[in-house]
Image (cartoon, coloured by chain):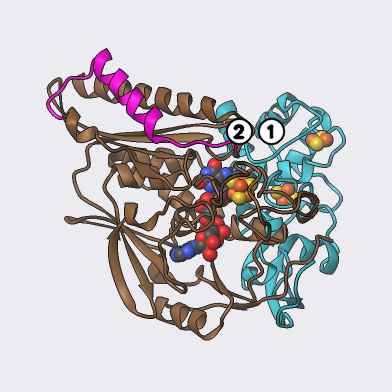
Amino acid sequence: MHAPGPEAKKRLLRLRVNGRWREDAVSETALLVDYLREVAHLTGTKTGCDGGECGACTVLVDGEAVPSCITLAVRCEGRSVETIEALATQGRLGRLQRAFHEKLGAQCGFCTPGMIMAAEALLRHNPQPTDDEIRAALSGNLCRCTGYVKIIESVKAATETVHDR
Amino acid sequence: MSAPLPQFRLAAPRTVTEAVAAYRDHPGSRFIAGGTDLLVNMRRGIGNPTYLVDLSGIDELAEIRITDDGVTIGAGVTIAALAQNDVIVARYRALAQAAAAIAGPGHRTMGTVGGNLCLDTRCIYYNQSEWWRSANAYCLKNRGDSCHVAPQGQRCHAAFCGDVAPALLALGAEIDISGTRGTRRIFLSQLYVEDGKAHLALADGELVTAVHLPPDPPASAYAKIRTRAAIDFPLAGVAVALETSGADIVSLRLALTGTNSRPFLLAGTEAFAGRCIDDKLLNEVDRLVQKQVQPMRTTITSANYRRVAAAALARRLITTLGTAGAA
Ligand SMILES: Cc1cc2nc3c(=O)[nH]c(=O)nc-3n(C[C@H](O)[C@H](O)[C@H](O)COP(=O)(O)OP(=O)(O)OC[C@H]3O[C@@H](n4cnc5c(N)ncnc54)[C@H](O)[C@@H]3O)c2cc1C
Ligand code: SF4
Ligand code: FES
Ligand code: FES
């Protein structure tokens, strides 16, 4: 498919994933989503499209929600990456996870990790968002099942719970 | 795993001088800023750079500076930062509105002003997977021999769909460019060429480093139509900058995106100075827009729809700005 270019170099990548520093030899051409799934074995992050369209791969980089399928892994050098796996602590679901579960915000569940990470970024900046603010923050995340109503209700419900996180 | 990207090396310069040198020393280079356009295309087998020069670590590109001489926006400023800047929101309204209407929140966090101005042009026969394009014998813009939109012609009509450019054009922006032969400053309008395959007047290895806006801008606004209210590129986008004195127009500048292979300033609006905003004027603007836009069948909507919608956006923005100015 691609004409052979120069051999991509592997680099030692040092970054924080879900609070823990780690070092891996990573190709300069590797996408963050593939690094997370294949190298760090964090398969909660999903791939839903062929690049940048759907938001299923949304993770937090330094607290900001971004699509990991169009982010080069080596550009996360020294940064903090958080995935859906970070939200449950000691076997307890995080407040957004619990709300999505209770309010039926997830159906097939494929968009859910991305939805929750986008919502997580929102709630950290803005703990009491309006419905419009929730819609705007999730506007880059597509869902083919729920019709979105239950997703908005789930995020809303998460803002009403008083939890450890 | 995702289909692998073409094999490239990545350089991470810290200054513009280093970036220019890295590009010069590696034939087959491309600049990458946020990567929200470039990496999408590369994942689809479009372009095969062997070397990427990463602009995201260059601090001098990441600043918005506000002085008595106006505003200077570094090419590396993110779309999200632009949309949220207090001075831009308060005084360069069209620009803030355009930035806020780009893609989705994650793209705005990563995407930059420079990448938006130098965005590749778009077409339904081009923004497709490698498999899809190969099954359709590719097209003129990339690896093919003919255009599926205008098969008789020898020109690519892919549309420029960046949202920031029309706002900057209406507000009279200039840009700084750096390359191996030094730096130059041009009007933003001079950056663009009406050719979907080669729409940027940049020499190989030149990069945009900053945008300058004059101080004391007139009132301005931007609006776009798109299929969904988020994520989607403009089918047509219009920016208007309007200065009035009482009910009279002092100056009216209008720029468009999404309809042609380049964003452009509507010609002939000088004639509106001294006139008031009434139906007659709006009809004249409508005719000018419909005459100058050249939408082709490059989107899922018809060319004529985009033509009529662009004119309708123009009327609406002028009416709104005129009413606000008179109030
Ligand atoms: C799903 C989706 C929806 C989108 N919707 C919109 C939309 O509605 N409106 C819109 O305008 N855009 C949209 N985009 C495109 C993109 O996200 C933005 O335009 C963004 O601002 C591009 O900036 P970047 O820094 O990511 O560009 P990059 O991908 O890094 O670069 C884009 C191009 O510009 C070149 N380049 C980058 N910086 C410079 C520079 N300083 N000098 C010279 N060349 C340079 C690169 O070589 C490349 O060719 C969308 C993208 C996706 C994936
Ligand atoms: S306008 Fe024609 S040549 Fe250009 S991208 Fe579309 S099909 Fe290809
Ligand atoms: S998988 Fe990243 S946006 Fe769809
Ligand atoms: S729950 Fe199935 S895609 Fe959203």
Q: In the displayed structure, does residue B180 sit left or right of residue A12? A: left
The extreme top residue here reads B279
Q: Residue at x 42, y 66 (%)?
A: B202
Q: Is residue A9 visible?
A: yes
Q: In the rendered image, which residue does mark 1 sit on?
A: A155
The percent coordinates of residue A29 (x first, y second) are 71, 71
Q: In the rendered image, which residue does mark 2 sit on?
A: A134
Q: Is residue A57 magenta?
A: no
Could you classify mark 2 by the number of other residues whose Cα lies within 10 Å: few (under 14), some (14-19), or many (20 or more)? Answer: many
The percent coordinates of residue B80 (x first, y second) are 48, 49
The amino acid type of the residue labelled 1 equals Val
Q: In the displayed structure, does residue B256 sit left or right of residue A58? A: left
The percent coordinates of residue B134 (x first, y second) are 78, 55
The amino acid type of the residue labelled 2 equals Ile
Q: Is residue B293 magenta?
A: yes
Q: Quadrant of the C terminus of chain B?
A: top left
Q: Residue at x 75, y 76 (%)?
A: A26
* Tag 1 and tag 2 share a subunit: yes
- Disc 2 element: helix
Could you classify mark 1 by the number of other residues whose Cα lies within 10 Å: few (under 14), some (14-19), or many (20 or more)? Answer: many
The percent coordinates of residue A138 (x first, y second) are 64, 37
Q: Residue at x 28, y 25 (%)?
A: B321
Where does the magenta region start and end? B273-297
Alpha carbons under labels 1 and 2: distance apart: 7 Å
Marks 1,2: beta carbons within 8 A: yes
Q: For chain B, what colour was chosen?
A: brown
